[in-house]
Amino acid sequence: IEDQSALRAGPDKDAATGRAAARVRFSVGGVLLEEALVPLGEDRPFTFKLEHAGPALAEIAVEPAVGELSQVNNRALISVNGVRDRLRVLLVSGQPHAAERTWRNLLKSDPSVDLVHFTILRPPDKDDFTPLNELALIAFPTHELFVERLEEFDLIVFDRYLKRGVLQSEHMANIAKRVRDGGALLMAVGPEFTGRTSLYHTALRDVLPAAPAGRPLEAAFHPRVSDTGQRHPVTAGLAGPTATTAPTDTPPWGRWFRQIPGDATAGVSLMTGLQDHPLLLLDRVGEGRVAQVMSDHIWLWARGYDGGGPQGELLRRLAHWLMREPDLEEERLGAQVRGGKLTVERRSLADTTAPVTVTSPSGDVREVSLERAEAGRWRAVLPAAEIGLYRLNDGTHSALVASGDLNPLELSDLRASDQVLAPLAEASGGSIRWLADGLPDLRRVDPGRDTAGRGWIGLVANKSYVVTGLRDVALLAGLLLALLALAPLMAAWWREGR
């Protein structure tokens, strides 16, 4: 994402503090980006660039003044949601095969993807007497794509491509450099990866997580999610919430029939296949990311063979991880506030996690130990009684979460003033009294009379009621009333008779 937003530090509420300027700190996601000395009463713009899609919390904080009543309104928070405009993808295919359409359909199905797709079938110096009307109408723009405009592509995909003399060594070096500088590379390999024309024998070998390790393996197998893959957001829960991870269990998806054996030299293996060779590997290289699929049979899932499989969800998560989607980060600290509860969640590939330090809006610090909720996730739930910004840190990662409104209106100006209610009181014929002057008497006044006076305030007796009906209900029935009246007489007569 390359998007820019701006926040402004507004004028001080009271310029009579004796200071001419205030020190303002501007941070995004808890990371300090800029610190400036801003004159009181003047605007100061702060500009920043979003580094990833999704929500980001920007904060402007000003240092407290001497004798300040409260520091609760010394910061302003803005939630900025980054949306990726267009994803520019370069897909280069080599030998034609059934999976080529799978990759193309996946990328073309997303309207936010600008796809440039080339299929290189032969080197430019080959002459096999093919008629001109069956050849490409334009020459492959190698210099333009891999030298001049390579920085414009967010993701580069090689699908069973091998060296054919079209892309030179300098082009491969440019791609490797692009990855280290923050680009993304996805490689789906086939039998060509094990030969002399493999891309592994180019400058890309320095950024690939696996090297070829023998001839292609041709046998039926079920792709399995590894132990690390059960914790990684790209493959976690891929088989469904009821799937087990025992080695003897059969995954609930179809079989593949070919795998390229590889030696993992870097990164993590999320899926395995024949002879426990890595099938899907991810790695971070410099500022960029690389994914490597060691088979060309994912198209079997797309065709529904043997029950099919979650190829759509897997490839979607894979592309989003390559594009640094925050929700797919394998090492991440996050939190949310719901129903007065602060839920802290830590994602990690490790077996244990460090305690998290939680700082409340009032400045109280508390250390919380997280409990394992599921594979790769640890959680803790705390009461969130205060309104404001909670800060979390585990020594490596940090997170911010707001409880309630980001900038409550009642905290914007803490000075006691009648300026807000004065217009309303005047329009309604009322008055404003300060408790420091004593509690006024309360009186009932008729409509149209004064509602306030010296030492008293009035409540208007509008008598605005309407009688809509009248009903008489006897308190006692007649027979019962007669019995109650005769009972004392009978008792007196009986007493006189004795």
Image (spheres, rainbow, N blue to C red):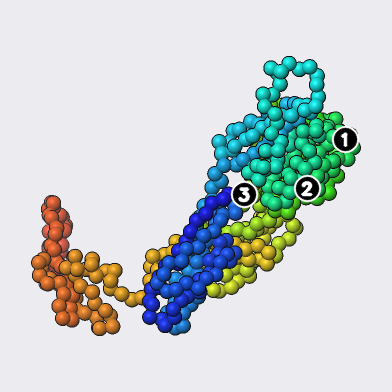
Identify residue for label 1: 196
Judge from the rendering whether residue 53 lies leftward or rightward of residue 159; answer left or right. Answer: left
Q: Which callout, 3 or 2, points to the residue nearer the camera?
A: 2
Q: Position of residue 254 (x, y in %)?
A: 73, 31
Is disc 3 placed on a helix, strand or loop?
Answer: loop
Does dot 2 land on a helix, a strand or a loop?
loop
Residue 227 visible from this viewpoint: no
Quarter occupied by residue 423:
bottom left
Residue matched to label 3: 325
Residue 7 appears in the rendering? yes
Residue found at x 17% / y 78%: 456
Q: Percent x, y for residue 175?
A: 73, 44
Residue at left offset 68%, top offset 64%: 396
- Residue type at mark 1 is Arg
- Label ID, residue 207: 2
Q: Which comes sooner in the sequence, label 1 or label 2? A: 1
- On screen, residue 331 versus residue 453, left or right, reads right
Label 3, label 2: how many angstroms apart (C-alpha)? Answer: 21 Å
Position of 82 relative to 460 (above/below) = above
Q: Mark 2 belongs to which amino acid? A: Val
**Which residue appears at 70% of the width and 52% of the height?**
181
From the viewer's side, name the closer residue of 155 and 299: 155
Around disc 1, counting alpha carbons within 10 Å, would you say few (fewer than 14), some (14 to 19), or many (20 or more)? Answer: few
